[in-house]
Image (tube, coloured by chain):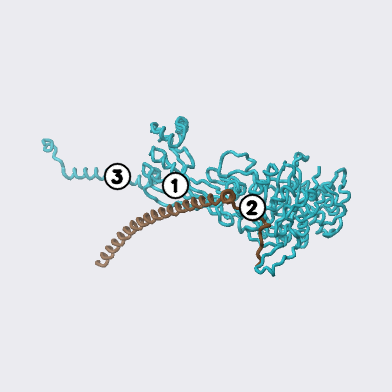
Chain colours: A brown, B cyan
Amino acid sequence: MIVRAVALVLMLLATIASAIGVVYARQQSRLAFIELSRLGNERDDLNFEFGRLQLEQATWAENNRIDQIARGRLGMVSPAAAQTIVVKR
Amino acid sequence: MNAARVVPANPRTRLYVVLALLGLASSALVVRAVDLQVVRKDFYQGQGDARYLRDLSIPVSRGTIFDRNGEPLAVSTPVESIWANPQEVLEHVERIPALAKAAGLDEDALRQKLIDRSDKEFIYLKRHLNPDAAQAILDLQIPGVAAQREFRRYYPSGEVIGHVLGYTNIDDRGQEGLELAFDDWLAGKPGVKRVIRDRLGHEVENVELVREAQAGRDLTVSIDRRIQYLAYRELKAALAEHHATSGSMVILDVPTGEILAMVNQPSFNPNARANVEPSWRRNRAVTDVVEPGSTMKAFTISAALESGKWKAHTPVDTNPGTLSLYGHTISDVHNKGLIDVTGVITYSSNVGAAKIAQTLPRDQMYDVFHRFGFGEVTGCGFPGESPGLLPIAKAWGPVEQATIAYGYGLNVTPLQIAQAYGALANDGRLRSPTFVKGAQNPDRTVVDPQVAAQLRTMLETVIVPPGGGTRAAVRNYRVAGKTGTSRTAVGGGYQKKYISLFAGMVPASAPRLVGVVVIHDPQAGAYYGALVAAPVFGRVMEGALRLLDVPPDNVQNWYTAAPETARSMPARRQAPDAAADDANVAEEVPE
């Protein structure tokens, strides 16, 4: 009789513990999901920032612009083939 | 009080009545509860969810397109689009002027638009604003106005590479070029998340991720931005110099078939969605066909060598510089008299090519041309690629066979010419060109390696005097190539409009690059391929060889540390510093 009562109480406690566990796990999952979303957004923002910077760099390094500056402002020329001496290794 | 005494209540009966009433009431509650919770659960759950659960789309950015050295060519960057719920905005009419002002819209037009769409819950007010401008509108806190993240595509190289990349529409989907060809690869899949939102539209809780967002994948194309720019600059300059209407240039990497550069003029800026002449958007190097003119002679001679009837030095009598064939006259600009097969290439003799073709079975000639890829799409996968037109052998009469031998009566794209010269450069193995770095197509043997080697030797004679293509020469390198001139065909006849062509390869001893230049309708006097197209080839290749660090194979003056040991390498053929006189560059253009 006592054994059965103890078993019953244990089962009851286990059920309650499991119920609390479910609640806890659910809460943890929500927190983790929020954290995941936050990190995902952060990753996306960093990617976008990277893309913007890449775009900016590519715009500054645009061949036509480099060409204009080198020839126009800096007065640079590419050496003609006749001015080039090939070094033999 | 009195009544209680008059009718004494039986406490037991009273108890039963109360119990029965209570029992009925609780049964009613239970029935109602079961009804709500079990029987009609789905309906109510659905109704409840519909009021606060929302499936939201997670936008993804389109993959970046890089050139072969990792330089970005097309980048998507987030922008904000302002949208409105007309019903909600119309409840606050007094805010419309402020909204119109902030969004830079006409107030009356905005009001009319909202009224017209008042049965909708979503309209765009202004798309693709930069984040600051969008925030300025949101700061007004007008009910029913919100922002949505979208992506806009930017092309830092602009019109230099516009034709190859194509462009996307306002919804970031590919419309033309590689953007269209690789749309599925680049686009990715938007994700879906389920959230709980309150009455004001704030996200209270993320419930679950229905589908994970799959970002667009990046694409590394075979184009080298530096060579692309070089080709763009030189082609544009040549068009201006010769008052030509349009032109194309293609550069292939011989071992892999990768397209290192592909430019067209006129061009367009893919960043601007404004209306441009639709023809400017065409990637002419792939979609437009030309008659290849004398550049085709290389393949006629390939067929001749392959037949065994002709060797490189078999004599061909081109006297008297004309050939009459069924009332059709084929003529050379200058009568070169008795020359050999190599001379037919060197001097670009139409009569010689026609006479050689007459000895070949038409099926064999067709077969060689077909093997070199003419008449079929190259397999590069570019949208709208033209297969050109190589008439079937059965349709060739003697005149057709003779004219096809020097490049008339068939249509090819500049890319096809490049592919075919690539096969000559690659020891007779043809590899379909590709736009993707590292994605080389399988190659197949189209002509005997010895024939290809002999052809390269013949094509080298074109670039040195007395050959006609001296302006394509690149100092310190041996160049092999062929000039060509043809006329624009219109409705069965030929106009007095010319097409100047040059196709060639460098360095001739072990070809690394193949280039094709096509210039339409030069009107400043010169129109021969040797004068208009060949110089573009020479100038672009000089830069491309330097950029790619290709070792020179024809150096006359080596620099060595000790002056006493310095000596000139005996050059097999000297690259000329000055172009030959124009008499040598003339080639016949038939009427």
Residue occupied by mark 2: B261
Q: Chain of mark 3?
A: B
Q: Where does residue B497 sit, x and y in percent of width and height? A: 74, 41
Q: Where does residue B90 sit, x and y in percent of width and height? A: 41, 33
Along the polypeptide, which appears first: circle 1 or circle 3? 3
Of B147 and B72, which appears nearest the observer? Answer: B72
Q: Are marks 3 and 2 on the same chain?
A: yes
Of B345 and B205, which appears nearest the observer? Answer: B345
Q: Secondary structure at mark 3?
A: helix
Residue occupied by mark 3: B29
Crowd around label 2: few <14 · some 14–19 · many ≥20 (10 Å): many
Residue occupied by mark 1: B56
What amino acid is at disc 1?
Leu
Residue ID at (37%, 49%): B205
The image shows residue B487, relative to residue B456, as above or below, that is above
Judged left or right of residue B327, residue B521 is left
Q: Quadrant of the C terminus of chain B?
A: top right
What amino acid is at disc 2?
Ala
Along the polypeptide, which appears first: circle 3 or circle 2? 3
Q: Secondary structure at mark 2?
A: strand
Residue B555 location, quadrant: bottom right
Residue B243 location, quadrant: top right
Residue ID at (74%, 44%): B526
